[in-house]
């Protein structure tokens, strides 16, 4: 923008709760940005007022460009860095261009009302996001503070109920910090048809099935697939070799059912995956699997064959090639896309692809292993070992050789 933007958090008590020095800062601005509710809180003054575009991200850059060089104040709820506009603006403009003046966040107020420490609960937002993203956090005994539009509270309750967590204790905290503050203590089952104020959040004590582990190695049965699935033990070896770190991006090339990329995304809420799959039916299944396993926003499906479909994608930190490794140009395009320190893991189940991986191993080094897994299986009235098809795994770090 060529100038700084100040983001001011306002609590539920509204304008009377804004400190005098912060009020002066707001009233001195050339431009006020915010939602209609926040803009209406500020007394009339000289500032130009403009609401956030809807949808926000596609129109945000144009909005900021229009006000370049002006003294801009953006209004937000509570702490603008708790799933708020402050985070978005810093990502867009850089941290040096954004000053944040927070109020007490609704999350902090909610923890105070519940008597929960920050260390013993997780904060999740489904505001403007798929409610399915809540699924990855549902494990028995877990405490969650869930930011949600009040109108979607019944949808969250239905997700809990349908997922075997209907007995979970749920507190609906509304208008926190305002004179109209209210609270409903109930269960997920009893909130499926509830009507609550729009300014609400949920505090959930999960009670139900054990839920899903965040560690890699989910059961094969949890994935919808047509046979193109990296089986559990082999998938676990792939994810461990890929070594996901918070905030990193994986390309899952020839993704099949998307299991490796989904497991990668589940390791940390900041991890993301681009799944590249040319088969339309499998691409659709990846999206359904990602939603069912709680990472609908973290897994993006690119439909098309590699290497052509890789052109123009965001640079990855790691790449898994589960299918198509023998196709001309696939490994070349993947290797070229990695920066030094990037990891590449490729699997082969055919002799042709195995021969390709052996050549790459000889040139680039890394580790070449053959994974053979056997499962106990009935043989008449007895039990014997049934072997899975062996998988050759090549893993390498770019620049290590």
Image (tube, helix red, strand yellow):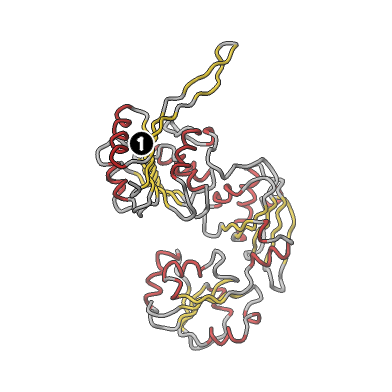
Query: Where does the image place residue 337, in percent across and percent down from the top left?
Result: 31, 50
Q: How many marks?
A: 1
Closer to the camera, 43 or 262? Answer: 262
* Residue 293 visible somewhere in the drawing: yes
* Residue 280 visible somewhere in the drawing: no
Closer to the camera, 98 or 131? Answer: 98
Closer to the camera, 97 or 346? Answer: 346
Query: Where does the image place residue 24, in percent across and percent down from the top left?
Result: 56, 87
Quadrant the N terminus occupies: bottom left
**Residue for point 44% across, 53% down:** 248
In this rendering, is residue 37 above or below 246? Answer: below
**Residue for point 63% across, 66% down:** 199
- Secondary structure of the residue carrying tag 1 is loop
Residue for badge 1: 323
In this rendering, is residue 152 above or below 284? Answer: below
Q: Image quadrant of residue 276?
A: top left
């Amino acid at each position: 923008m060529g100038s700084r933007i100040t983001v001011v958090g306002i609590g539920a008590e509204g304008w009377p709760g804004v400190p005098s020095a912060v009020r002066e800062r707001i009233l001195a601005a050339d431009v006020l940005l915010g939602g209609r509710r926040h803009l209406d809180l500020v007394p009339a003054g000289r500032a130009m007022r403009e609401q956030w575009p809807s949808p926000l991200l596609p129109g945000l850059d144009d909005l900021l460009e229009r006000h370049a060089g002006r003294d801009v104040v953006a209004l937000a709820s509570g702490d603008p860095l708790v799933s708020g506009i402050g985070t978005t603006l810093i990502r867009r403009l850089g941290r040096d261009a954004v000053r944040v003046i927070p109020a007490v966040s609704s999350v902090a107020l909610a923890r105070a009302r519940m008597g929960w420490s920050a260390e013993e609960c997780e904060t999740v937002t489904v505001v403007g996001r798929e409610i399915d993203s809540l699924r990855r956090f549902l494990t028995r005994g877990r405490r969650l503070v869930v930011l949600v539009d009040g109108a979607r509270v019944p949808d969250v309750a239905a997700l809990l109920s349908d997922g075997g967590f209907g007995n979970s204790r749920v507190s609906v905290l509304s208008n926190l910090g305002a004179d109209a503050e209210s609270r409903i203590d109930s269960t997920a089952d009893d909130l499926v048809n509830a009507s609550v104020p729009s300014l609400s959040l949920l505090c959930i004590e999960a009670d139900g099935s054990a839920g899903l582990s965040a560690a890699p190695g989910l059961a094969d049965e949890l994935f919808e697939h047509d046979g193109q699935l990296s089986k559990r033990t082999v998938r676990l070896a792939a994810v461990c070799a890929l070594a996901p770190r918070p905030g990193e991006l994986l390309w899952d090339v020839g993704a099949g059912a998307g299991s490796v990329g989904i497991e990668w995304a589940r390791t940390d809420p900041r991890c993301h995956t681009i799944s590249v799959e040319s088969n339309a039916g499998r691409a659709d299944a990846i999206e359904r699997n990602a939603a069912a396993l709680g990472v609908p926003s973290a897994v993006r499906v690119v439909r098309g064959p590699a290497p052509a479909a890789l052109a123009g994608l965001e640079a990855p930190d790691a790449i898994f090639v589960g299918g198509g490794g023998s196709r001309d140009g696939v490994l070349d395009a993947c290797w070229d896309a990695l920066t030094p320190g990037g990891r590449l893991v490729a699997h082969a189940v055919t002799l042709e692809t195995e021969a390709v991986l052996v050549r790459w191993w000889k040139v680039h080094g890394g580790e070449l292993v053959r994974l053979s897994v056997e499962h106990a299986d009935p043989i008449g009235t007895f039990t014997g070992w049934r072997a899975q098809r062996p998988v050759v795994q090549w893993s390498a770090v770019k620049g290590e050789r």
